[in-house]
Amino acid sequence: MSDCIFCKIASGAIAVSPVYEDDDFIAFPDIQPQAPVHILVIPRRHYNSLVEVEDAGVLGQALQAVQKTALALHLHSEGFRTVINTGDNGGQTVHHLHFHVLGGRFMTWPPG
Ligand code: 5GP
Ligand code: ZN
């Protein structure tokens, strides 16, 4: 989508510093980090949200991209949190599917 900020990042029109990328996904730091490590993992293809993805393979590949991102950042030993905000009640503000990967501190529960 031409007016989607994450599509622009995915295509390279807006430059980021990727911490992981492959043909289908790119992971880069959140502009407003909520933890010492706060990465967004996005598919290069545009989906408005989690509920728009019909292909189970894409969902599996997305979680693999999250896993590879966490491994690349050595988050796996201390642990990390993965968040998918979906729709208004979910607090989604950017309507291009993305996975938050948060680490570097203890995460409290429940979320706000
Ligand atoms: P949501 O609230 O939709 O789950 O998360 C959207 C996230 O995207 C927010 O954490 C916000 O800080 C981040 N974000 C919004 N615009 C940009 C941007 O232009 N660059 C980067 N790196 N992150 C962004
Ligand atoms: Zn998009």
Image (spheres, rainbow, N blue to C red):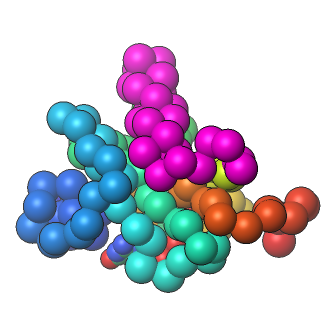
Q: Which residues are magenta?
A: 55-79
- Nearest the viewer among 66 and 112 is 66
User: Residue 98 placed where, x, y %?
Assistant: 46, 52
| Side of 11 relative to 24 (left or right) | left
Residue 92 among magenta residues: no
| Side of 99 relative to 16 (left or right) | right
* Residue drawn at the location 61% of the way across and 60% of the way down: 102
User: Residue 37 placed where, x, y %?
Assistant: 55, 67
* Residue drawn at the location 48% of the way across and 23% of the way down: 60
Residue found at the far left of this picture = 13
- Nearest the viewer among 83 and 33 is 33
Q: Is residue 84 shown to the viewer in this render? A: no
Q: Is residue 56 above or below residue 39?
A: above
- On the rendered image, what quadrant is the N terminus found in? bottom left
- Nearest the viewer among 27 and 54 is 27
User: Residue 31 placed where, x, y %?
Assistant: 42, 79
Rendered image quadrant of residue 55 = top left
Q: Quadrant of ligand 1?
A: bottom left
* Residue drawn at the location 23% of the way across and 37% of the way down: 22
| Side of 60 relative to 20 (left or right) | right
Residue found at the far right of this picture = 110
Q: Is residue 36 above or below residue 65?
A: below
Residue 59 among magenta residues: yes
The overriding secondary structure of the stretch rendered in magenta is helix
- Nearest the viewer among 106 and 57 is 106
- On the rendered image, what quadrant is the C terminus found in? bottom right
